[in-house]
Image (cartoon, rainbow, N blue to C red):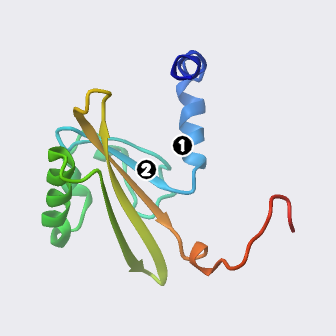
Amino acid sequence: MENLMLKYLTKIDYEILQQILDTLPVDITFVDSEDRVAYFNKLGKRIFPRTPAAIGKPVQLCHPEKSIDRVNKVLSDLKSGKRDVADFWIQQDGRFIHIRYFAVRDTEGKYLGCLEVSQDITDIRKLQGEKRLLDD
């Protein structure tokens, strides 16, 4: 399966991959193993805005001063293997924001970085019952 995916992934160019990631209903930021911002999606359309100037900068500069200690603790826990995921949620401007940090590791378990995923789940929290595919 992995070889088959790799065969087709090599045919997907950067622009298509960028559009795929921008289509997801989440903000994604990848922070490398040295805690520097290496990638983010949705330029200009994010819950927590990022500018191109953030690339290569310490991720701590992307967070409010009051939360830097917590950011460092999460990164330390992800690097050490103490945890693989950290979940947080906050209220912001009347919206409910779910923030998740995922350790990204290679096949040997070596820490490659952290994927921060943020999503406005205000409307998701209101869902009830069920809706099947193609129901109006």
Q: Residue at x 32, y 27 (%)?
A: 107
Q: Pointer 1: what residue? A: 21
Q: Residue at x 16, y 64 (%)?
A: 68
Q: Do callouts 2 and 1 mark residues in contact (Cβ within 8 Å)?
A: yes
Residue 114 appears in which quarter of the rendering?
top left
Image position, residue 2 (x, y; %): 51, 22
Task: Kindly state the secondary structure of the residue where label 1 is placed.
Answer: helix
Tell me which numbered mark, 2 or 1, is placed earlier along the sequence: 1
Does residue 132 appear to the left or right of 100 in the view shown? right
Does residue 54 appear to the left or right of 35 in the view shown? right
Q: Residue at x 53, y 19 (%)?
A: 6
Local crowd size for mark 1, using a 10 Å CA cut-off: few (<14), some (14–19), many (≥20)? some
Identify whether 70 is placed above or below 94: above
Quarter occupied by the C terminus: bottom right
Identify whether 96 is placed above or below 61: below
Specify the amino acid type for callout 2. Ile
Residue 1 appears in which quarter of the rendering?
top right
Image position, residue 84 (x, y; %): 29, 50
